[in-house]
Image: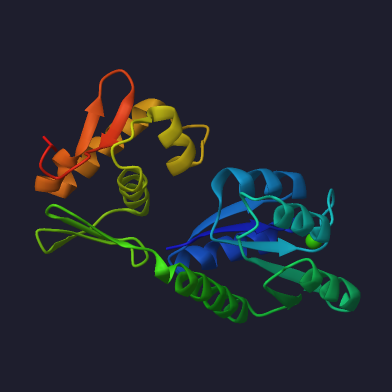
Amino acid sequence: MARVLVIEDEEDLQQVLEYNLRQNGHEPLAALRGAEGLRLARQHRPDLIILDLMLPDLAGTEICKSLKKDPAAKEIPILMLTARGEEIDRVVGFELGADDYVVKPFSVRELMLRVQVILRRGQLESAGRPIHEFGILRVDASAHRVWVEEREIELTALEFKLLVTLLERRDRVQTRTVLLDDVWGMVAEVTTRTVDTHVKRLREKLEGAGRYIETVRGVGYRFAASAETGK
Ligand code: CA
């Protein structure tokens, strides 16, 4: 599952893309304006951005430029949607660092294939991420898989992100606010209480390895320093 942000002002097209992304197992995020798209991109750090070149408030090229300059967003691949005849913009799009483009009108099937290609490329690049072994817990950060005592555990994308964030900052306390920022990306409707709920569920799923996630009262959570001290 990948989080895909679509910045496109045509509502019909936006809906078609949203539907098809969901059908392909992805989590779509929609912006009808450029400024909103930029905000969502920085807030949610999607795995891919589908960006229309012609938007009412900001040109797609400007959005692309501004994302590629932003250290927090520059790694996000961008697929540009251009109208027929926008040859110059197309070239500029590539100069600006777009990863691919599709000319309107396009077949949605073709677009979804391009999306898969870009996402797969991203996964290959992240394939160098480590496999963590910690006591009875094993986490493959690039394959998004978790095992406890050699038994595979099913986690949601969010639970997985929460686990890896804690694990990679082992022995350092993470406040609820920091976790909200880094795991949830500060979605407005989420509160610090949500962090507690998710940690609770994550611990339950991890069974015997759940004790590695320690509560630091009044502050937040911490992944144990060593598998032996986890209680
Ligand atoms: Ca447009």
The residue depicted at 46 percent of the width and 70 percent of the height is 123
Instruction: From the viewer's perspective, tell me whether residue 221 is left or right of residue 124.
Output: left
The residue depicted at 43 percent of the width and 43 percent of the height is 183
The residue depicted at 67 percent of the width and 72 percent of the height is 99
Q: Nearer the viewer, residue 70 or 63?
A: 70
In which quadrant of the rendered view does residue 95 lie? bottom right
Residue 128 position (above or below residue 156):
below
Residue 11 in percent (x, y) is at 70, 56
Q: Nearer the viewer, residue 170 or 68?
A: 170
Which quadrant, please, contains the C terminus? top left
Which quadrant, please, contains the N terminus? bottom left
Residue 21 in percent (x, y) is at 52, 65
Residue 95 position (above or below residue 156):
below
Give ligand 1's quarter of the image: bottom right
Instruction: From the viewer's perspective, tell me whether residue 85 is left or right of residue 193.
Output: right
Q: Nearer the viewer, residue 92 or 174?
A: 174
Instruction: From the viewer's perspective, tell me whether residue 6 is left or right of residue 85.
Output: left
The residue depicted at 35 percent of the width and 48 percent of the height is 168
Residue 131 position (above or below residue 184):
below
